[in-house]
Amino acid sequence: MMETVIGERATIDGELKEAIISSLKDEIRQFGFASILVSGGSTPKGLFNLLSNEPLEWSRITVSIVDERFLPNGHADQNAELIKEHLLINEAAIANFIPLVIDPSDPVNNLKLVTTELQKIKRPFTVVVLGMGSDGHTASLFPDSPMLDEAMDLNCQNILLNVRTPSSPYSRITFSRKEILNSKNLYLHCYGQEKKEILNNILASIHQDRYPISGFVNQKENPLNIYWAM
């Protein structure tokens, strides 16, 4: 059953942090390790800082990203840099991090390398935290992407896909919808009235085909827990 949590930003960040911590602890208790995929952008910075200070068994936790811009490692526009700066610090500095760009010179080879790294860890992922753009995209699943249908297809055989979109100046790599929905605990973390209106439209079945995020909201495979603040 989908859960929607609404409140002030600090409250939402704190409640989502607690939900994530509980899921990670349970997974470690049961299997000895856990994993989390997070999103880039400005929204999760507060959440990342909260998580980074939690005294979890971070050495047993693998962190990765739902999508990434295909840029040289260390580039300021990479999601990995945001995560290194705000999440992989303090207590979380010892977490195992799998970036989505290992070979920035060759997208095809990079896809193979990252897929191989991900296959070394237990899946499904314990936690996936999605974000949402003002166009209704999530991860690098953009409405104008020529590869959107393939990336959203629940029969897609790829964990990751290389994608391009006219609205973005960079090539990208993204997890497929199928792989994201296969996670054990799925969350959407978003702020702002514009995004609330998108969610309201999707829930009311108004223009929902315009928004890739609708493929995660209106589905029964894995209930999406929504954490929204103004």
Image (cartoon, helix red, strand yellow):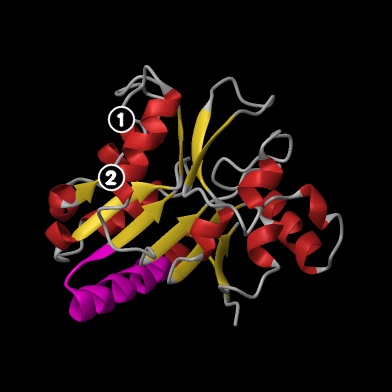
Residue 171 in the image, given as x and y percentages of width and height: 53, 25
Residue at 47% x, 44% y: name it: 160
Q: Looking at the picture, which amino acid does disc 2 mark?
A: Glu
Q: Is residue 218 above or below residue 94?
A: below
Residue found at the far top of this picture: 105
Left or right relative to 145: residue 88: left
Q: Taken as a whole, is the magenta stretch helix, strand or loop?
A: helix
**Is residue 176 in view from this perspective?**
yes
Residue 117's label in the rendered image is 2
Which residues fall within the magenta stretch? Answer: 14-34
Q: Are marks 1 and 2 in contact (CB under 8 Å)?
A: yes
Residue 191 placement (x, y as % from top left): 58, 53
Provide the residue designation for mark 1: 102
Disc 1 crowd rating (10 Å Cα; few below 14, some 14-19, many 20+) is: some
Please name the residue shown 29% across and 23% down the image. 74
Residue plotted at (32% across, 32% down): 81
> Residue 70: x, y in percent?
45, 25
The amino acid on which the numbered mark 1 sits, given as a three-letter code, is: Ile
**How far separated are the C-alphas under marks 1 and 2?**
10 Å
- Residue 132 in the figure: left or right of residue 122: right
